[in-house]
Amino acid sequence: MKIDDIKVIGNIGAGTMGHATALQFAMRGYPVRLVDSSRQALDRGRGLIEHDLDTFIGAGLISQDQRGSVLDRIQEDTDYGILADADFVIESVLEDMDVKHQVWQQVEAIVGEQTILATNTSGLGPTEIASVLRHPQRFLVAHFWNPAQLMPLVEVVPAANTDQGVVDTTVELMNHIGKHAVALSTESLGFVGNRIQAAVIRECLNIVERGIATPQAVDEIVTYSLGRRWSILGPIASADLGGLDVFDNISKYLYDDLDNRPGEDPVLKAKVQAGQLGAKSGQGFYSWQGAESQAMIADRDQRLLEALVADRKKEEDR
């Protein structure tokens, strides 16, 4: 399957991630077959799609005149049979291996043998997911980052039996719809982004637990130093610029003092046991209730949107 052979997109899940992936493909001109388990879920997803589309219109990423045609490209149903003509299917359902096995067995029984199958899992192993398939060579991960309508990265992760051509076509397709796709050489737990994120969060919470700094102080330090720098060049290139001898010397005395405890993080465990889950429960390390917290979220989304607009302008200027 080459990118020119991909005419119709199958999109399973209309929730937080799924509605956004459906919109990305529809904005690029693809007919999308959107599937979810209930009419209520599809209606909620349609509302999210319309909201995000209006945001893009306001930012000048798409014109008001195109709004109707984008929405018309998205066909919704609770029946997997709607996926029969899909050339590329992406799934964003519950992060549960049994659920994903059930979904993909249903899909494979419906789609053609050349259809590319992609899961938007954020960490489950693609080889294990693909173990129930008759044709695992056309299965892989296309991991969008949340919020998927604003974050450019898609990690493309092959399973043990994935054909390289499937990886190449998926990378090309993700870039074609305006994302920045990066292929991994092989699968790993958490892929790359979440491995790095987990390592950083573990040390951040270690700092808090040891009383070195408050959560707010840690966030400010990262935001105005590493976050600013890494948004331009990644950590390895930054190490090159700083001098590898400097980083080698730092590693000699600092690595042994960093948190390397295996297993569940004790700080996170205590928060979860207390029902303090973050924004979803209204309280985590921060309070997520009231106008101030909503303003923080709105500011984040606006800055991500501005960065997306800048990315598009840079592409157009090339």
Image (tube, rainbow, N blue to C red):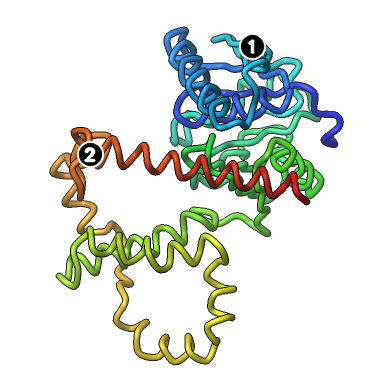
Evaluate whether residue 33 shows in this view: no
The kind of residue on which mark 1 rests is: Gly
Q: Quadrant of residue 262?
A: bottom left
* In the displayed structure image, the side of residue 39 where residue 310 appears, left or right: right
Q: Quadrant of residue 297?
A: top left
Q: Which residue is mark 1?
A: 68
Disc number for residue 292: 2
Q: Secondary structure at mark 2?
A: helix
Q: Is residue 14 above or below residue 299?
A: above
Q: Nearer the viewer, residue 126 or 224?
A: 224
Q: Position of residue 111 (x, y in %)?
A: 73, 21
* In the displayed structure image, the side of residue 50 where residue 31 appears, left or right: right
Q: Nearer the viewer, residue 256 or 286?
A: 286
- Badge 2 crowding class, 10 Å Cα cut-off, few under 14, some 14 to 19, many 20 or more, is few
Q: Position of residue 71 (x, y in %)?
A: 62, 14
Disc 2 from disc 1: Cα separation: 35 Å
